[in-house]
Image (cartoon, rainbow, N blue to C red):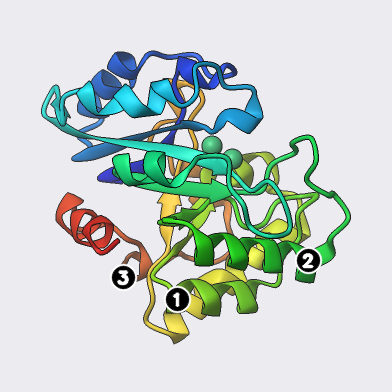
Amino acid sequence: MKVDLHTHSLASGHAYNTILEIAKDAADKNLEAVAITDHGPALGFVQYPNYFHVLRRIPDELFGVRILKGCEANILDTEGTIDIGEKVQRRLDLVIAGLHVIPGFPRDLGPEGNTAALVKAIDKNRIHIISHPFRPGFPVNIKKLFSACQARHVLLEINLSVLRDELDNEMVVANTKELVDLALENKAKLVINSDAHFISEVADDSILKELSFKVPPEIVLGVGGYKEVAEFLADK
Ligand SMILES: [Zn+2]
Ligand SMILES: [Zn+2]
């Protein structure tokens, strides 16, 4: 991996490194860019919105690595409301959004209901990436979600942390395969992210070798380097 667009720092409250440590680790791993995407306030984050507001004071480059300032926002309801406002969204280099277990979000929507909430979220907000679109508890209709994301220039994520935890989960593996096939058929891109909560996880994609199918590099954003990522981000 040359870029990792989804990592968590101490500010998430349940991750264990500073931004400086993440940047240094990314440099040691020869990454061109790393995104710091701490959780939005619905997951217990303190000092909202000030933290995200001031985030841009961090230099754009640390140890020779491009540092992208982002957030992993939470989808709050079936109307696709997310937990960071428009002003904060505009101040960030990238916005990831995903379904998490948070108070108030229904857990029994099923694939069509979850998909509808995600599609409404990308319609209403400046979202670049949908994190872990398939995980236990939040099934989605991958085909429908893929089409909606393609139409709105939003990328779906292969989340390496979910894959590592759920390698025995048939739904997760089957959905990953379906997503790869859809990207290939449509000559579309996906994004592969670590969702690291500790630096040993940053850019560690070794779990992909455990899959019975390959994820071809031509469908992965940023395989050639940061330039392609910058173009994608500048599109919104
Ligand atoms: Zn997440
Ligand atoms: Zn995350």
Residue, far bottom: 185
Q: Is residue 209 visible?
A: no
Q: Amino acid at mark 1?
A: Gln
Name the element at disc 2: helix
Measuring 84% from the left and 60% from the top, which residue is drawn there? 109
N-terminal label among 3 and 2 = 2
Q: CA distance from mark 3 to mark 1?
A: 16 Å
Cβ of mark 3 under 8 Å from ligand 2: the answer is: no
Measuring 43% from the left and 85% from the top, which residue is drawn there? 186
* 30 to the left or right of 155: left
Which of discs 3 and 2 lies nearer the camera? The answer is: 2
Provide the residue designation for mark 2.
Answer: 113
Measuring 48% from the left and 21% from the top, which residue is drawn there? 198
Point out residue 90 in the picture as x, y percentages from the top left corner: 33, 46
Instruction: Choose between 151 and 201: the one closer to the eye.
Output: 151
Q: Quadrant of residue 166?
A: top right
Q: CA distance from mark 2 to mark 1?
A: 19 Å
Which of discs 2 and 1 lies nearer the camera? The answer is: 2
Provide the residue designation for mark 1.
Answer: 150
